[in-house]
Image: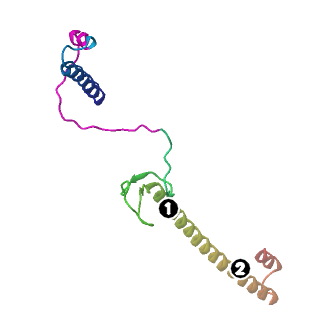
Amino acid sequence: MDVRTDMRALRLATGALVVFALAGCGKGAPPPAAKEAASALIAVDTIAVAPAELVEEVAVVGTLVPRAQAEIKSDIPGRIVEIPVREWVRVRRGDPLARVDTREVDSQIAKARTAIELAKANLAAAEAGRAEADVAAEQARRELERLRGLKDAGLATQQSLDDAGS
């Protein structure tokens, strides 16, 4: 039974006791109203009286506003996988409040590192190609100088000098 039913039964029992007590307290003949009440049969439910805990509640409608607020932000996006702090526990600035799943961010970092390594390899290959081109250009310049010397000595033709220059 709930508290309301217990209270209702207690009121009925108290009312019956008052009626019976008033009926037996008078001197002489009871008044006619008490006589009629005593003679009328009343159907009542009875319960055994036992101690019980009484819970008082107050229903309130409204909005709760905290005295102080804290703004919590994450530097990285992700799903929260652990909250090591429980409610109403005092924390200080810098204490970890939650652990974020960083697998996605770690994957992006690894992808960026791979791209950096690939760019470094491409740069090294380009620098090696440039060095080869510099060597080839130096050889071509020397060959042209040699052919000019041979042309001046009359040992090379103008055609071979023109072919080397183009």
Q: In which quarter of the image is the N terminus?
A: top left
User: Residue 18 sits in which quadrant?
Assistant: top left
Q: Magenta residues? A: 34-60
Q: Residues within 10 Å of mark 2 (few under 14, many from 20)?
A: some
Looking at the image, the residue that sits furthest to the bottom is: 153
Q: How many labels does the image show?
A: 2
Give the residue at x 23% y 16%: 44
- The percent position of residue 93, horizontal first and vertical second, equals 45, 66
Residue that appears at 56% across and 70% down? 120
Q: Residue at x 38, y 61 (%)?
A: 90
Q: Label 2 is placed on what type of residue? A: Ala
Q: Mark 1 points at which residue?
A: 109
Quadrant, the C terminus: bottom right
Q: Where 73 sits versus 8, above or below? A: below
Q: Dot 2 corresponds to which residue?
A: 140
Callout 2: SS: helix
